[in-house]
Image: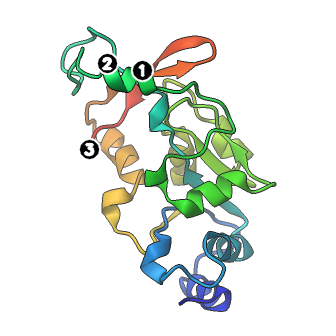
Amino acid sequence: MVTFRQFVTSLRELGIDQQSAVIAHVSLSAFGQGNGGAETVLGALLSVFETVIMPTFTYKTMVTPEVGPPDNALDYGYDRDRNRLAEFFHPQMPADPLMGVVAEALRRHPRARRSMHPILSFSGINAEPLLQMQTLEEPLAPIRGLYENEGWVLLPGVDHTVNTSIHFAEALAGRKRFVRWALTPAGIVECPGFPGC
């Protein structure tokens, strides 16, 4: 079991300037749950870094049309059952379980703010300028903001297979991006710039 003090000590040993913004992808289970759970890890991050963001994506808002653009890495017309289960995006919607319990703890934090992308939202503390950069057309803009400001990617307990920042690097390298659709109170919204694995 890892304690709050051990988390803080380990994060400080990284030698990252406390004023640097960080994006974190965390697996709580990699640390044996820790003493205090997700709040312990989040508290350690916030005590070491002034600006912390995490992906709080909401895949359950996604719908798939019957037809759509070609070469979109998507089979159209096969997700009718999933479409029926889709939920309207709203800012209080929990992050997808794939994001982890620490990301959900950040989203729920009283000081946290969340971007409004209906699938690929980010939550953060002291991160309003980064979150406000995001648009439907540029869903990875908060990561671009980190890049432009020499921010850091932290991967406590995970590897690069869950590093969302890799998708920004793919975009810089010219990798094709895709279109997805989300259910919102205003109707179904097209979400271009969607990364692929």
Name, please, the residue furthest toward the right. Answer: 110
- N-terminal label among 3 and 2: 2
Q: Considering only vertical position in the picture, is 145 above or below 183?
A: below
Image quadrant where residue 5 sits: bottom right
**Identity, as a three-letter code, of the amino acid under mark 1:** Arg
Residue identified by numbered label 2: 80
Residue lying at the far top in this picture: please name it.
67
Q: Taking the image as drawn, is residue 179 in sight? A: no
- Front-most of 82 and 123? 82
> Which type of secondary structure does the marked residue at label 1 adopt?
helix
Residue identified by numbered label 1: 84
Label 2: element kind: helix
Secondary structure of the residue carrying numbered label 3: loop
Q: Position of residue 143 (x, y in %)?
A: 51, 48
Q: Amino acid at mark 3?
A: Cys
Decide if residue 28 is on the left or right side of residue 170: right
- Residue 164's place in the image compared with 73, above or below, is below
Q: Are marks 3 and 2 in contact (CB under 8 Å)?
A: no
Determine the residue positioned at 44% across, 26% down. 85
What whole-number distance in Å separates the C-alpha atoms at marks 1 and 3?
A: 25 Å
| Relative image position of residue 33 (x, y in whole percent) | 53, 79
**Which label is found at residue 152?**
none
Colouring: rainbow
